[in-house]
Image (tube, helix red, strand yellow):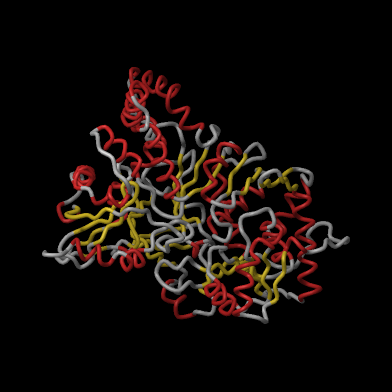
Amino acid sequence: MTNLADALHSTALKTPSKVAIFHGDRQVTYGQIVEETASLAAHLRSQIGVKPGDRVGLWLQNCPEFVPALFGILAAGGVVVPINNFFKPAEVAHILDDAQIRVLITDQSMSEPTAAVLALRPSLAVWHVDALPSLPSAAFVPKNGRSQDDLAVIIYTSGTTGEPKGVVLTHNNLSSNEEVSAESFAMSPDDTAVSFLPLSHVYERVIDYAYLFRGVHVAYVERMDDLPQALLEVRPTLSAAVPRVFEKLFANIMQKGHGNTGVKRRLFDWAIGVAQRSVKWRAYGEHAPLGLRISWDIADRVVYSKIREGVGGRMRAFISGGGPLSRELAEFFWGVGIPVYQGYGLTETSPVVSANCPNANKVGSVGKSIRHVDVRIAEDGEIFVHGPCVMRGYYEKPEETRAVISRDGWLATGDIGRVDADGYLYVTDRKKDLFKTAAGKFVAPQPIENLLKVRPLILNAVLVGDKRKFIGALIVPNFANVEVAAREQGRAFASREQLVADSWVHDLIGKEVERVNSSLAQYETIKRFALLDHDFTFDGGQLTYTLKLKRRVVEERYAKIIEGLYAGT
């Protein structure tokens, strides 16, 4: 493969009239995509004078226009700098300056934030993809002479630990990663995928490359809040997601089940119990006695099939990435017949390092390293990666690059993990997120938080305790399930504020915490916790746009509550 634009061109030549992507009632064929791609490339060359290697900003929501805009920049020989539509104008201005962007491509839906950016950078050239005239000479993407070793994109990281840095990736970084990481899923034109994670993020975009290069129908969803309805309407067979999506799906399933009464509630509880007893069989392939298989078949007809219908009823592979998915959550979905394959990667590795797949899956792990990629574990547990997926470096930041990439090409990921005897990788936590208690014990917060989040009365949780005498937690109750339990006791609450302040609720959640503590070492156990009356959100600043937690922000935002946990100790 020469470059990514040529790869799309090759696919389109085979089936130009085939529908590639759809968005609501709109359908776009491969032929239309490459015609729009060539038109945009011609505009960039002739009117803006974009030359090979010039950086071009791309600021769009998930929509059909994103694809020809992305490949149009590449076909013109430019370097794509995707900008997340959630970024604030000042953040966008920083990226424009840092990447030395010549022109910003956007559309009319982004007119308000674009105007704010222009107020900060009035000399910036802005193009709207939905207002460009088609060029009559634009047929298929011309060969642009770009090689696989040339730069393709500069992706700015989500900034969970500081100011975003531009990750420099070549055509080969991305194309080699797409080709190898997707090969075990046998994607074909018979598949339909739903794409809802930000296309500005490397995880979703590389998976979209895999879809488009293999003829998969792709439905774009602009907002994550629209995902439940999209799953019902699109009925996909494939989708990529992040752990928070699975946590919310689980919470919704439990909320609906616990909202039933009488026979329906008892049937739901029985079916969940069957799923739990079936985990060794359904998730790990161990032998199951005939009685359990019969029970599972009955539970499948009356409960699990309805759960699967909630995600469209046809899902053959949910791919989880962007952070560690709890083993318990993965086991639940496998137990009810929804296959979830977890992988691992970083923006700096284009992104996939390892992945579970249909022919090699171990629940709880993030899979084996993909072909041509090597993984080793340092003495302190940090994961190091080597292979064609490793970035060229951080844009214009040689010192930061040398700090993470050794002379022989090994990337320090900043993640802690281990590799088992079968070659499966397990990721424990971020190295910077590890707590060291006042007693000198190291605690990894994410696994414990994941245990809390699968309790039916807990929606979300964040551990605290670095340099403290003990571990504490901020807990968001599953309000719907707590209210159901309260009604059964003749209790009611006028507001969420009243709910989290109630001593009965605190004791109820405390029992959930005790259940989690029973599986932990003494120094890991949660001694005190506070209840919050709202969840962590992107809009609130506590989550990245891929729904990963910003611990520093949470610790700053809730500093008084956290200090209260340690008062008097």
Q: How many marks?
A: 0
Task: Please say whether residue 302 is visible from this viewpoint.
Answer: yes
Q: Give residue 118's position: percent from left, percent from top.
A: 64, 76
Whole-percent x and y of residue 455? Answer: 30, 42
Residue 361: x, y in percent?
A: 43, 41
* Vertical order, 275 against 84 (above or below): above
**Quarter occupied by the C terminus:** bottom left
Residue at x-position 73% and y-position 49%:
11
Image coordinates of residue 433 in percent, x first then y, are 31, 63
Q: Nearer the viewer, residue 489 or 130?
A: 489
- Tell me where residue 4 sits by quadrant: bottom right
Quadrant in the picture for the N terminus: bottom right
Left or right: where 461 falls relative to 214: left
Which of 92 and 75 lies nearest the eye of the viewer?
92
Q: Is residue 373 left or right of residue 190?
A: left
At 75% from the left and 49% from the top, the residue drawn is 30
Question: Residue at left 41%, top 39%?
Answer: 252
Report the residue that reaches farthest toward the left: 569
**Furthest-front residue in this view:** 494
Relative to residue 445, is residue 255 drawn left or right?
right
Residue 287 visible to the viewer: no
